[in-house]
Image: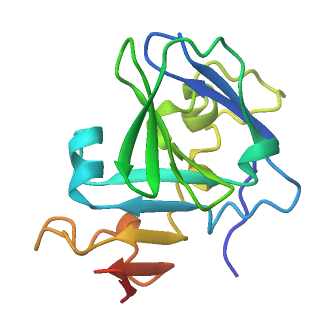
Amino acid sequence: MAPSYPTPKSITGGCLCNKLRYHVDFPADHNFETSCGTCQCTQCRKQSGSLFLIYHRVAPASTAFRFTSPTTALKTVRASPKAERVICGECGSWIYWKHSDKDYVCLTIGSIDPLYLFGEGAEDGGEVPAEGFGRVLVSCGGEHCWVGNEIKGVTDDIGLTGKGKGFRVVDGGEE
């Protein structure tokens, strides 16, 4: 039996310059294990500046996710005909990507506030544990939406990128 970790009822996050802020209320049936995934496509690498993107899927986007700040700094970038990326037009922080045909957003893990990721500023006996909720927000037990660009000996055997868990997509089909 897998260990059980505390899960958040809600989280907050935003961009580096704080012009874009958001709040997420997780539905009672939110599956933290399968809602986190990775992507190793070239677009995600270029946008994030990392070898792979780690995201947490939030559905339904229509009720679970909301901006709590004015959205004048919000910029939408078309990643493909069916997907868009939402970034801050001021500081360039990537907030989420969204598939046009789906009612969910994929939050970039780096946009989640430190309080929720690793407990920065958590108070004894408070709602957020001292270590935060990073363990469940970054479990990466869900989809790994593109592994066709794995780098041999570097990203092809990292547990976070889905070896042995979730499902992995290469060239549009499951591996």
Quarter of the rendering containing residue 20: top right
Question: Is 144 positioned to the left or the right of 5 in the image?
Answer: left
Q: Is residue 47 above or below residue 33?
A: above
Q: Quadrant of residue 136?
A: bottom right
Q: Position of residue 84 (x, y in %)?
A: 45, 45
Looking at the image, residue 59 sits to the left or right of residue 116; the answer is right
Residue found at x 56% / y 37% = 117
Q: Residue at x 49, y 13 (%)?
A: 73
Q: Quadrant of residue 168?
A: bottom left
Measured as percent of width and height from the top left, residue 157 is found at 25, 75
Instruction: Please state if 121 lies on the left or on the right of 152 as rendered.
Output: right
**Quarter of the image that includes the N terminus:** bottom right
Q: Is residue 147 above or below residue 105?
A: below
Res. 8 visible in picture: no
Q: How many marks?
A: 0
The quarter of the image holding the C terminus is bottom left
- Where residue 62 appears, x then y in whole percent? 77, 45
Task: Name the foreground residue: 135 vs 61.
Answer: 61
Colour mode of the rendering: rainbow
Q: Residue drawn 36% across and 61% down?
A: 39
Q: Position of residue 16 (x, y in %)?
A: 43, 17
Front-most of 38 and 103?
A: 103
User: Does residue 89 appear in the picture of this structure?
Assistant: yes
Seen in the picture, residue 36 relative to 55 is either above or below; the reply is: below
Vertical position of residue 122 compared to residue 33: above or below = above
* Residue furthest front as drawn: 81
- Residue lying farthest to the left in this orientation: 152
Residue at image x 19%, y 70%? 150
In the image: residue 19, left or right of residue 29:
left
